[in-house]
Image (cartoon, rainbow, N blue to C red):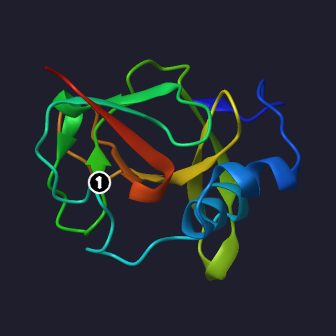
Amino acid sequence: MNKVSEPRVVKSEAEWKAQLSTEEYEVTRCSATERAFTGLYWDTKTPGIYNCKCCKTPLFDSNTKYDSGTGWPSFWQPITKDAVRTKEDMSYGMRRLEVVCANCDAHLGHVFPDGPNPTGLRFCMNSASLDLNARE
């Protein structure tokens, strides 16, 4: 995965706040985490593409979504390797890899090395950072 560099979509805090709900803003722009088993997509089985809530960039395909038992939408890979980027997160006394949208730097969640084959990765995302575009 790529390291985070400058986002391509840049807006002021006021613009983000006007565009997003309070929860969406806290999650995507302030790296908050929604409570487990409460987000819109944690148990959704609807086929489609999960886009970034902030900039609408395609991030994950439902074909890679699985039930991780964690209460958050989990995927074993992003839609393309360049859709997301990672950066080290040392918050809460833990070392984790934060996942952000490569296009606008929105906080999406974290990636862990305990996912299913074929990647062995678990992209544990916040529903508040995603927007599902259902397939017809």
Determine whether the residue tagged by mark 1 lies in a helix, strand or loop.
loop
Amino acid type of disc 1?
Pro
Closer to the camera, 34 or 82? 34
Find disc 1 in the rendering and name its residue.
73
Residue 98: tell me if it is visible.
Answer: yes
User: Residue 67, relative to residue 22: is it above or below?
Assistant: above
User: Residue 45, relative to residue 109: is it above or below?
Assistant: above
Q: Give the image quarter of residue 42.
A: bottom left
Which residue occupies 28% across, 38% down?
76
Closer to the camera, 54 or 119? 54
Which residue occupies 73% across, 54% down?
18
Residue 10 percent coordinates (x, y)? 83, 34
For the C terminus, the quadrant is top left
Q: Is residue 132 left or right of residue 87?
A: left
Residue 111 percent coordinates (x, y)? 45, 50
Q: Is residue 65 left or right of residue 88?
A: left
How many numbered markers are drawn?
A: 1
Which residue occupies 17% across, 28% down?
63
Residue 29 percent coordinates (x, y)? 71, 56
Would you call the spot at circle 1 few (<14 residues within 10 Å), some (14-19), or many (20 or more)? many
User: Residue 122, relative to residue 71: is it above or below?
Assistant: above
For the N terminus, the quadrant is top right
Q: Is residue 62 left or right of residue 105?
A: left
